[in-house]
Amino acid sequence: MTEMWVNMGPQHPFNHGLWNLRVKLDGEKVTDAEPVIGYLHRGWEKMVESRDYQQIIPMSDRLCYCSALTWSHVYVSAVENLMEVEVPERAQWIRVITIEIQRLASHLMWLAAVGTDLGSYTIFLYAMRERELFLDLLTNLTGARMTYNYMRIGGVRNDLPENFERDTLRACDLLEKRIKGEYYQLMDQNTPFRMRTIDTGVLSKEDAMNLGVTGPNMRGSGVDFDLRRDDPYEKYDEIDFEVCVEKEGDSFARYRVRMREMLVSCDIIRDAFKKIKEGPVRVKTPRNAPVGTAFAHVEDPRGESLMYVMGDGTNHPYRLKVRSPIFVTVSAAPKMCIGYKMADIPAIMGTVDMCVGETDR
Amino acid sequence: MELHFDYSGLYEFLYSVSSWLLWLVGRAFEFIGVDSDNFFYPVRQFLTDQQFVYFVALILVALIYLVAGLLFGIQFIWMERKFLGRFMDRRGTQVGFLGFFQNFADAFKVLLKAVIIPKDSDKRVYQFAIFGILAVSFMLLGLVPWDNNFYAVNVPLALLLGLAVFSLAPFTLILAGWSSNNKYTVIGGMRGAAQLIAYEIPILLVVVSAVVMTGTLNFAEMVAWQQNNVLLFIPLFIGAITFFIAGVAESERIPFDLPEAESELVEGWQTEYGSLGWGLIMAADYLRAYIVCVLFSIIFLGGWAGPDFIPGSVWLLTKAAIVFFFMVWLRAATVRIRTDQLLKFCWNRLLPLAVINLAIAVLIRVYSVGWW
């Protein structure tokens, strides 16, 4: 049988979002792969150049539909670095808590997507059920389910609502119980799940570093690197937490990293609630940024997200560059897919956690 | 001719009903004065002819059996939705009484959809494949009895015939996949054919062991043997498990639904089908699952054998529903596996198990271990 190119995308059940993975098939074996992105390009970086610094915050929420808070956070961090604003301590703690809640919600969304990719709607619905807990928390805090518009330059919009700590800790306890119980039995101990994920999409340590893969995908390949620990921002330096690393580099390792990260996030949230103190949550900031450049990079649920902002003395940025983790990670798709079966592609690309909103910007 | 119905079997009953109805028509002809010199006399003769009565009875049997089978297919879809819902921590369908009418709503929705045939497809084969897959399922439906008295046909080699019909399915899959002229459907059709052919072998071996035990290929005699001796599930436990797993694969359900793996192949060989054609294919899929369950309960669980206060067919369908419950459970608990793993699983695990099972059956038969 001669080889043929198959377009898996841009409208295909396996790609969550609009992108295209062209694969060359020899029978069922993938001999070549080529990711094509850009279907969701909105010209975000150009768009923000004509907006105020404050107006960009809700726009940065729209970068990723799974973890809006982390993107508005990296934006406000970059602008704070540019304006040299000191964020109050309580606001920093609130940021840590909300970002970790967002990370949990994002990872659960990823888990749901992996479930459907592998053909189990049980995983999908269980993950969505738990995600709802954290979305309820964020709704209680910010008033929105998806795009929160909560971060502010110089702090956060509002203080924590009543009983937020109690609700969050309860949700974390429940999630921890479920991950260690139901999820462990449904996925880790499930032979078909292991058959599908173990030894598929192996990405070696060297390849992961050379291709610029970051975040859980890189830690799944055995690279011990986490920006929260290695270049701490906000209050992460006051929290002692474990960086989850798996050596194998296959889909199962990436899956394990994310599941363990959820547990770690729960611990971080508990720790943060112990250390948070009363105080202001926001400071006054200037409207106009000084001439100069600044950047901020954070550990997004998907990897290292970075924003580089260039101020020209006016109230809107001269240039705002976004480094999106998945934009870089998707370039490792050929490395991960070639040599495996076509049926492995959902398992491989599903565990990478694609988010096309931030990829195409 | 007086009103006398033969209740000894569904076929006999319908034969007497149709002969009575046609006799009435004949009397009506006689009443309006159609006698031997009339122009319509041959029609009257034809209506009361033995062959024609036979034909009408056959049509009636087929109709009743088809409706009953389809109703049970629909009931299985409903069961799957409800059970799957509960497994997934949700409530399942809600339309009508316990959500039973959701299926009918879906059927009407599918009916009202526009029929779209791909421009570059091989249109005749494309449409034929729907009827091919339907014909396979409906033929099987006719072969599987519900009761000693409730069956469409009762041939001595029913089991063999049923499995032969079952093995026609891969051809229709390949035809459907190839004629749609789409890369996904081709891959799906190939996968489907490979899977169905591979899993036929363990099924056949297990069935052979059941035949060795009971010494018959007829469903009714098989059930009678189990009534007199022991449910085959007990001596042939390994075989029952093998048959169940292979049956899940034959009916293309998760974890073996590779031919229609929606995450990589969109919908596999069904991708290009729409509207009623797709609905019929879906119905045929569930009918195949239903047939596998009924076969399992006849071969291993004693079919309609059971205490008399409940009719035999109810026993059979209850057993089939219980088997289907396990199928749904399997679907809720597992993910889809890969083609190579599927085939490896068949050759490395199921086939040896089936052979061991056959050896056990032969040993029991030769040495008559125990009291059966």
Image (cartoon, coloured by chain):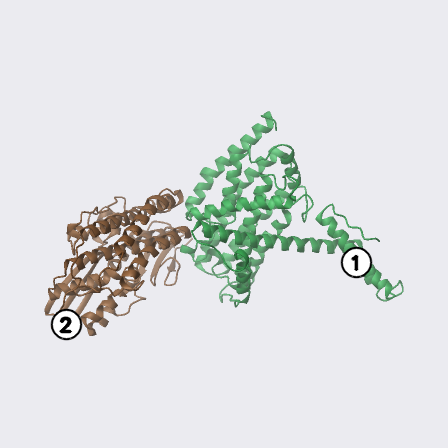
Chain colours: A brown, B green
Percent x, y of residue A252: 32, 46
Question: Callout 2: residue from which chain?
Answer: A
- Give the labeled residue for mark 1: B22
Q: Label 2, on which residue? A: A287
Horizontal side, residue B241 vs residue B230: left or right: left
Question: Left or right of B122: which side holds B303?
Answer: right
* Most foreground residue, A257 or B361: A257
The extreme front residue here reads: A162
Depth check, front residue: A106 or A134 = A134
The label number, if any, that marks residue B324 in the structure image: none
The quadrant in which the C terminus of chain B is found is top right
Please identify the quarter of the rendering in which residue B302 is found: top right
Q: What residue type is labelled 1?
A: Leu
User: Which circle, 2 or 1, is nearer the viewer?
Assistant: 2
Q: Distance between the residues labelled 2 and 1?
A: 96 Å
| Side (left or right) of B2 relative to B135 | right
A317, above or below B60, in the image: below
